[in-house]
Image: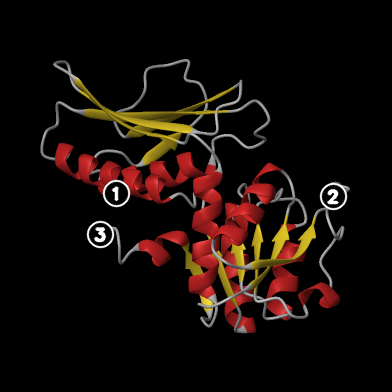
Amino acid sequence: MGHMNIIIVGYGKMGCEVEAAVAARGHTVACRVDPVNPKADAKELSPAIRKGADAAIEFALPECLMDRINFYTKEKLPAIIATTGWQDKLAQVKTIVEKSGSAILYGSNFSIGANIFFSLVRHGVEIINEFPDYDVMGYELHHKRKKDSPSGTALTTSQIIMDASERKTKLVTEKLDRAIAADELHFASVRGGYIPGIHTVLLDSEADTIEITHNARSRGGFAAGSVAAAEWLVGKKGLFQFQDFIKEKIK
């Protein structure tokens, strides 16, 4: 994809990272949209903003997401949805996208490193299917301002574990005041401080523990991945996941 004009939806810390990534990859920002940030160019999306734009990238709050989805699909604006906390509406979004003939790509984590982590977790769980002495569990740590829990990446990781595991079929994210059942996967969340994001999966036996960890040191990797995904999405139709974009690189 050549030069692009990109609308940034959600002009908080991640929106600023996206702005830097857009410039680093040789593109320009068509408009910065945010309902509260005075440094944004507009408070909401409009057809005038869409004119001349090639794609939208949003790291926003899940509130009013469906309104934005309806805008992207009506305006045939390819959109990268990096907003989390809306997966319960996935079936509804899929229907809207398919009926409109538009293109949307979503994901819980746009970091290439995180997707390497997903592949390692899947492979590790497949291995311990052959070794019943090993159990699997996980936890994630995030900064004190994060509003959703568990994180979207934790939910994706948990689903990968359950898909790969012959023993784990039920996800538990709340605290347990009882012994965990053999078919339950416990994935815990901790909030505090300024951590961009740490996700750890443990493969544990009486003899030892194997830890697989992704530790995001900055938000820049998420932003760069979202811009690269926008380049890939333009010209396509349908609802895609970030994994669809990188599957040629990570098997």
Give me the disc on residue 39: 2
- Say if residue 172 shows up in the picture: yes
Q: Nearer the viewer, mark 3 or mark 2?
A: 2
- CB contact under 8 Å: marks 1 and 2: no
Res. 72 image quadrant: bottom right
Element marked by disc 3 = loop
Of residues 24 and 170, which is closer to you in this image?
24
Q: Residues within 10 Å of mark 3 (few under 14, many from 20)?
A: few
Q: Identify the amino acid type marked 1.
A: Ser
Q: Identify the amino acid type marked 3.
A: Lys
Q: Residues within 10 Å of mark 2 (few under 14, many from 20)?
A: few
Give me the disc on residue 119: 1
In the image, taking residue 193 as reference, residue 240 lies left or right, namely left
Q: Earlier in the sequence, mark 1 or mark 2?
A: 2
In percent of the image, x 89 and y 48: which residue is there?
Answer: 38
89 to 180, vertically: above or below: below
Q: CA distance from mark 1 to mark 2?
A: 39 Å
- CB contact under 8 Å: marks 3 and 1: yes
Q: Residues within 10 Å of mark 1 (few under 14, many from 20)?
A: some
Q: Percent from the top left, x then y, of residue 109?
A: 49, 49
Q: Nearer the viewer, mark 1 or mark 2?
A: 2
- Picture mark count: 3
Q: Identify the amino acid type marked 2.
A: Lys
Q: CA distance from mark 3 to mark 2?
A: 41 Å
Which residue is under mark 3? 251
